[in-house]
Image: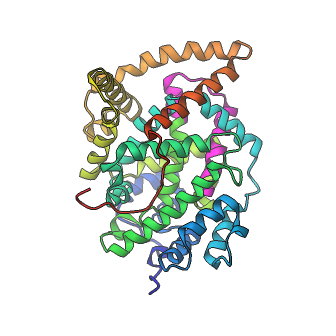
Amino acid sequence: MRQSPVHLTVPSEGEFVERYVNREQARRTYGPLADRYARFYLEADPVADALADAIAERRVTRAQVDSALRKGLPSVSDPAPELRAFIEAVETVPAWVDFALLNEGARVYQRLGPAAMFILSAWSLMNGYHSAPAVKPLMWTRQLDKMAPRRLAETGRFVIETVEEDGLRRYHEGFRIAAHVRVMHATVRRMILASGDWNTAAWGLPINQADMAGTTLEFSALVLRGADAMGFLLSKRDQRAIMHLWRYSGYLSGVHPDLLAELSSLERTENFTNLIYSIQPGPDADSLALAAALRRVPASRSRNAWEDRLAELVMRYHDGLTYAFNGDEIASSLKVPNPEWRHVIHLTRAVIRPLEVLRRVTPGMNQAVTQLGRYLFRANVEGMLAGKEPGFEAKRASAAA
């Protein structure tokens, strides 16, 4: 029986979900943008949701989706209309996309090397966990809490393939993963809504448009802020290139064009980012569980006493960055320990900034640093994956798992 598309309901004028807090202050500060953004808590991804319905009804197989993404729609015999519509949607390149600028953004991101993973973990993910409604889909699947190392590695794989040169072109791995994750999100959204365990009035729809836009900013705008805090020297052109790269990634991931328009300039992006984080309701017990699981990832990989000591040092460094990046209020509300390590950001900056100055004035060093950063970034992610390819699958683990 076909499921009712309750997840595509658009709110009536003046209707907002409970998670939209500080709304009067937001309206005074950000004007009509605040309410426009908040309405996206109740919007999903119709094209991907239709495909998820077709998969659930066995009119489309996962093998067909994978073949269409890897080889193109002609590789699928008699494709269902929902699969055809989805492939046509992701293959349509918006007029604003500049592939040369995308590649510039990819090279700049690669230059950050392993520092990008620390920023993504200690700022982007931790900041996202501070919003209780946004993490509910993660806890529903029970995957990040129980399999934090694996899920962090999969996030890393998504990032490193996105920031490869031409990674988001058709038939390249970054493109495929972005589209695949989009289908997975729609599948999870369908499963959650069918479970009856979801409070739409309080949280909005699972993996809604507003949260999808926020995730895109976690990979881009917050990384730019973190890179600056750590001492990296990024020109305005560098920053625009990174935002352009992730704006297109957001498009492939299904983010609404009206939300992506807010990423069209650095000024609009800064304003949009500040708005989003000003109206989040704060953490709950699920948030704390996810934050604790994330900071323990280094310990989960240690195999002997020496690695145990190294893991403890890495966790303390991560704790310090969490405080430095997010501020005491957010970090302490997530029960992150070791606040005294917040000053490690100054040591980090003292090391990186002189090297960045040297990079700028030394012929050939920019390319060398980019290549080294790419190698170290990829090696870090491959180490976390431990030889296992990421599945990016949508499934709910059993309570005993």
| Colour option used | rainbow
Q: Which of the 4 image quadrants contains residue 179?
A: bottom right
- In this view of the protein, can residue 29 be seen by the observer? no
Q: Is residue 241 magenta?
A: yes
On the rendered structure, is 57 left or right of 127? Answer: right
Give coordinates of residue 252: x percent, y percent. 62, 57
Q: Which residue is drawn at 34% across and 53% down?
A: 281
Quadrant of the image for the C terminus?
Answer: bottom left
Q: Which of 334 and 86 is in front in this view?
A: 86
Q: Does the magenta stretch include residue 214?
A: no
> Which secondary structure dominates the residues rendered in magenta?
helix
Task: Report the magenta residues as a range.
Answer: 224-252
Viewer-closest of 270 and 210: 210
Of 163 and 171, nearer the camera is 171
Position above or below: 69 against 79 = above
* Residue at the (45%, 42%) spot, across then down: 153
Q: Toward which corner of the image does residue 353 lie, by quadrant?
A: top right
User: In the image, residue 334 lies at what x, y percent?
Assistant: 28, 41
Relative side of 195 to 106, left or right = left
